[in-house]
Amino acid sequence: MSKAGGPTFEANLARLQPLLAALKNDGIGHLINGRRVESQTTFETISPTDLSVIARVAQGTAEDIDRAAQAAKAAFKPWSKWPVEKRRAILHKIADGIEANAEEIAILESWDTGQAYRFMSKAAVRAAENFRFFADRVIEARDGRSMPTPDHWNVSTRVPIGPVGIITPWNTPFMLSTWKIAPALAAGCTVVHKPAEWSPVTANILARICREAGLPDGVLNTVHGLGEEAGKALTEHPDIKAIGFVGESATGSAIMRQGSATLKRVHFELGGKNPVIVFDDAALDRALDAVVFMIYSLNGERCTSSSRLLVQESIAEAFSARIVERVRRIKVGHPLDPATELGPLIHARHHAKVCSFFAAAKEEGAIIAAGGAPHAGPGGGHFVEPTLFTGADMAMRIAREEIFGPVLTVIPFKDEADAIRIANDVRYGLTGYVWTNDMGRALRVADELEAGMIWLNSENVRHLPTPFGGMKDSGIGRDGGDYSFDFYMETKNICLAKGTHSIPKLGA
Ligand code: NAD
């Protein structure tokens, strides 16, 4: 036991070993129609901590996607007709299975992605919550509205759209995939899931848990592979009716093009360059905790991270100095060490991208107030120092582009109007965070911010019924509660006549 009561670093390492041995031995195949399927070609998934090969992974082709789509198509009608109580029960059973396997999921997810164990242990729990939340809403998924007129009664209802494709990214992949797959299954859809090629390990655990819970063959199919190959084929498949996608904005554009021939319905959760605005009257101790947490947790590889700190000029210097103190004490280390706060970044390519912004900051004339270099973490992996840039303005790339790492850019502002102008001066619009004790101002700023989700005097705290999604280049559509059902289902109106209206008579 660690001091906090959880497992120790040594215990986590010991648990990892047999899991790795099994993965090395078995490799990772696709799971199509309840069976393991191989591809002729494989790729390696690499640990970002010590660069060792974790497993060889089947590299799905258009043929593999076609098989999975056929299985999802065949399973669709029977699954969509399952009695709701039965469907509710099986989704709860899947949640039970996730909870029972939470340790294995947390350890493998940490090892595969480099995310610190302290966050991944909670991610598995949240994944179970996603299943429970949508399990309890199965019963109302088909609900609609009643819209009477004097002569007719209109009643709307919803029906599942059909087999859907879910394409997920590498940041917190297990939790994120449940966020998409649970509502799709609750709605009565069948699923072909294409996990990210940089983090394929835990997707098969979810498929295994679903199968053990009794989910019929073909209802959830997992096809591994590259985005441009398996991902593209999924978005182009005529039997796949919708694509739920989480990833980069540029990939969202590509998917829209690829899906156009088959008129794919799309739901996109894309990138962000989210502002946290701190006014001089804010509760600064709480604001400091939230600012630091929202960029340096989860390696900063977090779509909702507040990567731009907009701070009022009068307090900018003092507040930045307090952040520097904190940043210098953030514990960079082995992701399986429960004390670690910042693990290695996912991949060499992503590491190079994040590090390229250190040079950009210097060239653009910003100040590197903390960090700003690769970090020699244990194992020789893709570690970086948590970094703070100050003296930035909106002309700089560090203020405009999504870095997706533990890197915060501080931009001072004069007054409320200036804060709003700077906050909205980016192509993205996912989240915004505002810190002030003037509630009128908080509400005015919230109303003006071009973002899908705003938190006032709070970090990102998720409440599952609320709409989740972004404006501008950050996304299309909303997830959460009933919003998810709107995406995975078609709305149908049924109009009943009372027999009172006159019908136009032609040829009478
Ligand atoms: P990515 O777009 O590179 O990849 C995401 C997925 O898309 C992967 O499974 C990949 O294989 C697949 N893909 C790539 N090209 C494809 C194509 N042409 N057709 C079909 N599929 C394709 O994103 P990433 O680097 O894995 O993830 C990081 C990004 O995700 C960041 O921009 C982050 O902000 C975003 N993100 C957004 C949210 C949100 O809710 N808005 C949540 C998490 C991550």
Image (cartoon, rainbow, N blue to C red):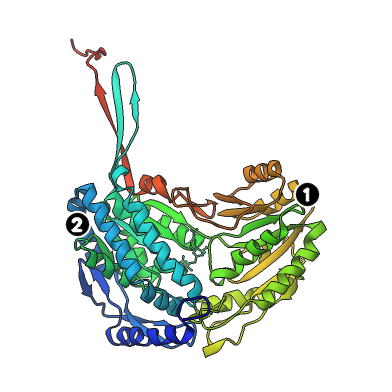
Q: Which residue is mark 2?
A: 75
Q: CA distance from mark 1 to mark 2?
A: 57 Å
Query: Which of the pair 194/19 is nearer the observer?
Result: 19
**Residue 153 versus residue 212: which sits nearer the camera?**
212
Dot 1 falls on a residue whose secondary structure is loop
Position of 430 relative to 380 (above/below) = above
List the residue tagged with mark 1: 415
Dividing the picture into quadrants, the one containing residue 387 is: bottom right
469 vs 295, left or right, is left
- The residue under the point 44% across, 71% down is 121
Element carrying mark 2:
helix
Q: Residue at x 30, y 30 (%)?
A: 155
Q: Nearer the viewer, residue 468 or 392?
A: 468
Question: Is there any visible trace of residue 341 in the rendered image?
Answer: yes
Q: Is any part of residue 429 visible from this angle?
A: no
The amino acid pointed to by label 1 is Asp
First in sequence: mark 1 vs mark 2: 2
Residue that sits furthest to the right in the current view? 314
Callouts 1 and 2 close, C-beta under 8 Å: no
Q: Is the CB of mark 1 within 8 Å of ligand 1?
A: no
Q: Residues within 10 Å of mark 1 (few under 14, many from 20)?
A: few
Q: Quadrant of residue 44?
A: bottom left
Toward the viewer: 315 or 73? 315
Q: Residue at x 52, y 78 (%)?
A: 349
Residue 395 position, x and y percent, is: 72, 61
- For label 2, the crowd category at 10 Å Cα-Cα, with few meaning under 14, some 14 to 19 and many 20 or more, is many
- On the image, the x and y values in percent for residue 110 come to 45, 77
Give the amino acid at mark 2. Answer: Ala
Relative to 285, say whether 58 is above or below: below
89 on left or right of 440: left
